[in-house]
Image (cartoon, rainbow, N blue to C red):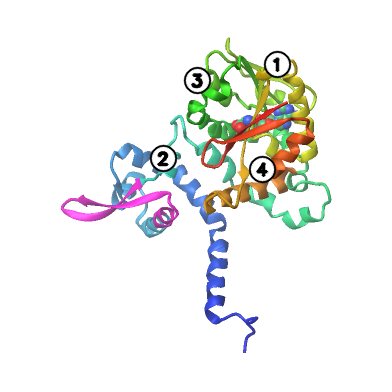
């Protein structure tokens, strides 16, 4: 008789279902989302003004009859995962199933202010998975990151040499930062008394623009790698500076670090934070650092939010020697970099806003 290590048959079958669910989701979960935007399905549903039936969608997309069953299968799975909603509609006197957008797929309509399609195009790309196929090799390569092992250099050097990838990356980051237009709306108390801010690693300036739109009295500077900011034009309220945050950071009342510290080890973060502290020196009570990052809180967060944070932690730990941090880990870092106090406030579904004071 086959050994089942003391498990009941039902437990073993449950284990098999759990395992298969994850194994089969590999590639399909991400690629089905990319497929949906490549075919423009969210845009079609959005422009249709009402839920769309399978036959309507098939006719608009001119899907060959041999593929209709497969398309239906993909749509059903996407609906099961919360990317479409299945509703009943009356169509030519018949009741039929139709697809509507959900909150998640509304964000996949192209060309809107809050579209996350650039994030899909960056994260779900066919050349992405070979990086992860080096995970075993990475385990034994001492200090090397998964990027070092698979791409031959760290992520920033790789992006610096690959113009197309660099564009995709910057667009993806900018799409995430568009959310700041909504998230920072209620944050007057954060910017009270702040007259100047430097967004360190601020990419193409999307967050800085959101700040200068919402708080026109704040003068913004974006510091990023020269390759990222070299062709960008500033305004009266927004200036771009090419440079290296490990060397020096322009002086301001406040420094913003959004999605920066999770890319770096504690030692590197200490250096960045010390440079930030130097940049706000002499600003008295106005001087502070604003960090926008995740705070891992398994005890309090919903399971889905913890899943996202742990998944991002895997990516940061393996790809770049960074990490997502718990409050304890953040606190330790702030104390080591010489800060006196901090305050964590919720910002979006998974990001917190942390203010740190010297
Ligand atoms: N803050 C942006 C981008 C986050 S990605 C956002 O949330 O959308 C990290 C950013 O750090 C990238 O734009 C990258 O170019 C920048 N970066 C990496 N190393 C840097 C360095 N040494 N000095 C300045 N910026 C750097």
- The quadrant in which the C terminus is found is top right
Q: Nearer the viewer, mark 1 or mark 3?
A: 1
Labels 2 and 3: the sequence-earlier one: 2
Q: Which residue is mark 4?
A: 327
- The answer to whether the residue bearing label 2 lies less than 8 angstroms from the nearest atom of ligand 1 is no
Labels 3 and 4: the sequence-earlier one: 3
Rendered position, 253 above or below 107? above
Q: Which residue is mark 2?
A: 106
Residue 260 seen in the current view: yes
* Residue 320 magenta-highlighted: no
Measured Cα–Cα span from mark 1 to mark 3: 22 Å
Q: State the extent of the magenta-drawn residues as a range.
A: 75-100
Q: Would residue 157 appear left or right of 258 to someone viewing this image?
A: right
Labels 1 and 3: the sequence-earlier one: 3
Q: Nearer the viewer, mark 2 or mark 1?
A: 1
Residue 40 seen in the current view: no
Measured Cα–Cα span from mark 1 to mark 4: 26 Å
Residue 283 circle label: 1
**Residue lying furthest top in this view?**
236
* Circle 3: element type: helix
């Amino acid at each position: 008789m086959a050994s089942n290590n003391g498990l009941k048959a039902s437990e073993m079958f449950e284990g098999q279902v759990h395992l298969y669910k994850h194994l089969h989701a590999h590639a399909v979960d991400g690629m089905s989302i990319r497929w949906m935007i490549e075919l423009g399905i969210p845009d079609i549903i959005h422009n249709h003004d009402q839920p769309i039936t399978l036959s309507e969608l098939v006719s608009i997309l001119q899907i060959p009859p041999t593929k209709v069953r497969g398309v239906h299968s993909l749509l059903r799975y996407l609906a099961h995962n919360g990317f479409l909603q299945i509703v009943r509609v009356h169509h030519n006197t018949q009741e039929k199933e139709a697809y509507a957008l959900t909150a998640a797929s509304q964000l996949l309509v192209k060309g809107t202010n809050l579209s996350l399609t650039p994030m899909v195009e960056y994260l779900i790309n066919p050349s992405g998975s070979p990086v992860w196929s080096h995970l075993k090799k990475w385990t034994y390569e001492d200090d090397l990151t998964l990027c070092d092992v698979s791409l031959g250099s760290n992520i920033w050097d790789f992006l610096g040499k690959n113009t197309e990838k660099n564009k995709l990356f910057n667009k993806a980051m900018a799409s995430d930062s568009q959310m700041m237009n909504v998230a920072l709306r209620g944050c007057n108390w954060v910017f009270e008394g702040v007259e100047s801010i430097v967004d360190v690693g601020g990419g193409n300036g999307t967050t800085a623009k959101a700040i200068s739109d919402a708080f026109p009295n704040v003068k913004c500077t974006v510091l990023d790698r020269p390759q990222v900011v070299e062709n960008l034009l500033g305004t009266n309220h927004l200036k771009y500076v090419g440079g290296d945050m490990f060397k020096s950071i322009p002086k301001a009342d406040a420094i913003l670090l959004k999605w920066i510290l999770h890319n770096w080890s504690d030692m590197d973060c200490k250096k960045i934070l010390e440079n930030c502290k130097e940049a706000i020196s002499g600003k008295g009570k106005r001087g502070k650092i604003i960090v926008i990052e995740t705070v891992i809180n398994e005890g309090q967060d919903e399971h889905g939010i913890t899943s996202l944070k742990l998944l991002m932690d895997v990516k940061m730990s393996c790809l770049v020697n960074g990490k997502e941090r718990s409050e304890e880990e953040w606190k330790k870092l702030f104390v080591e970099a010489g800060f006196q106090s901090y305050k964590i406030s919720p910002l979006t579904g998974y990001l917190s806003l942390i203010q740190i004071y010297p």
